[in-house]
């Protein structure tokens, strides 16, 4: 994996038995370190997180690394592939191909087509405006905006490129699937994502109010992480995802 970015990792707290492993594929322009906040929160609940690089930069290397991690029996199960943006597209493709060792799939901000989010320009003043527009599309979280702005490894303008894959088809995926999507996502509109998820029986799609494209790193990042943990806890007990916390009918 020489041309790909290094693996970023967050482990369960010392003295705590690991409850599972998440392999995370970032989206356009991102790297694994962008998901530090998410990784720390999930690992605090006992789940190991391994975040790779942007699959669009080196698809073969990222696919190889993800496949190796999923097959690695030293990492406890359930083993779950998490993808954001184009990482979600690649994760869905790996799941459809029947990746060995994969127990479930989490798709965050799944792109619904190959169309770019915007048109990039080379003019400096316009480029600055484009960057502000990209931030607006990505997230409303001031902390995450500050991180992206100061991150030299983050590739600005990458969101303007195509999502690489055609409109995703989830047919052929046999593992449990959780979708997380921002209700205010203008890069991949929620209405289009609903149509994609309807094609997969049993898949769950959760929308987050007031949330944009970077669903794991927006203002509702705590709710997104909590939703992931609840999904993982159900998965550990029952691959059929039987509910654990049940709201009682008080009528």
Image (spheres, rainbow, N blue to C red):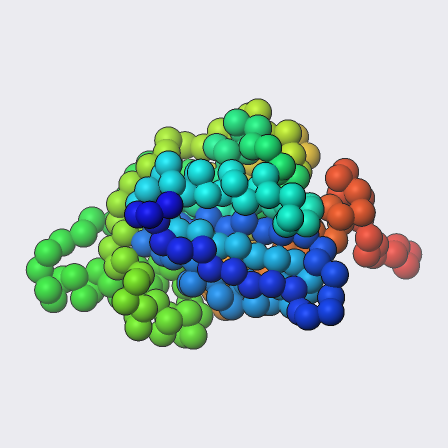
Figure quadrant of the C terminus? bottom right
Q: Position of residue 199 (x, y in %)?
A: 57, 29
- For the point 49% across and 47% down, the residue is 83
Q: For residue 49, say whether it is visible.
A: yes
Q: Is residue 201 left or right of residue 152?
A: right
Considering every residue shown, the one lying at the far left of the view is 123
Q: On the rendered structure, is 250 left or right of 241?
A: right
Count of numbered tags: 0
Q: Percent from the top left, x then y, of residue 194?
A: 54, 39
Q: Residue at x 62, y 37 (%)?
A: 101
Figure check: 149 above or below 114? below
Q: Quick one: which residue is furthest to the right in this view?
A: 251
Q: Quadrant of the N terminus?
A: top left
* Residue drawn at point x = 30 percent, y = 47 percent: 3
Which residue is drawn at the image coordinates 14% and 62% (left, top)? 126
Where residue 177 appears, as percent x and y from the top left, is: 62, 40
In the image, 225: left or right of 246? left
Can residue 188 be seen from the camera position used here?
A: no
From this view, report whether residue 62 is shown above or below residue 216. above
Nearest to the observer: residue 227 or residue 10: 10
């Amino acid at each position: 994996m020489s041309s790909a970015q290094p693996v970023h990792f967050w482990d369960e707290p010392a003295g705590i038995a690991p409850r599972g492993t998440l392999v995370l594929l970032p989206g356009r322009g991102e790297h694994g370190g962008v998901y530090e906040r998410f990784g720390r929160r999930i690992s605090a609940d006992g789940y190991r997180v391994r975040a790779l690089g942007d699959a669009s930069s080196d698809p073969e290397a990222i696919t190889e690394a993800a496949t190796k991690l999923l097959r690695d029996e030293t990492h406890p199960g359930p083993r779950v592939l998490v993808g954001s943006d184009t990482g979600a597209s690649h994760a869905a493709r790996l799941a459809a191909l029947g990746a060995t060792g994969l127990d479930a799939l989490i798709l965050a901000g799944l792109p619904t087509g190959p169309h770019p989010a915007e048109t990039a320009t080379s003019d400096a003043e316009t480029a600055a405006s484009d960057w502000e527009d990209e931030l607006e599309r990505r997230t409303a979280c001031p902390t995450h905006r500050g991180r992206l702005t100061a991150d030299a490894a983050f590739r600005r303008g990458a969101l303007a490129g195509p999502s690489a894959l055609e409109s995703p088809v989830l047919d052929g995926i046999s593992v449990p699937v959780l979708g997380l999507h921002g209700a205010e996502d203008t890069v991949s509109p929620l209405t289009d994502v609903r149509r994609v998820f309807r094609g997969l029986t049993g898949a769950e799609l959760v929308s987050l109010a007031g949330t944009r494209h970077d669903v794991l790193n927006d203002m509702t990042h705590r709710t997104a992480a909590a939703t992931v943990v609840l999904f993982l806890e159900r998965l550990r007990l029952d691959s059929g995802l039987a509910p654990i916390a049940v709201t009682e009918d008080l009528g």
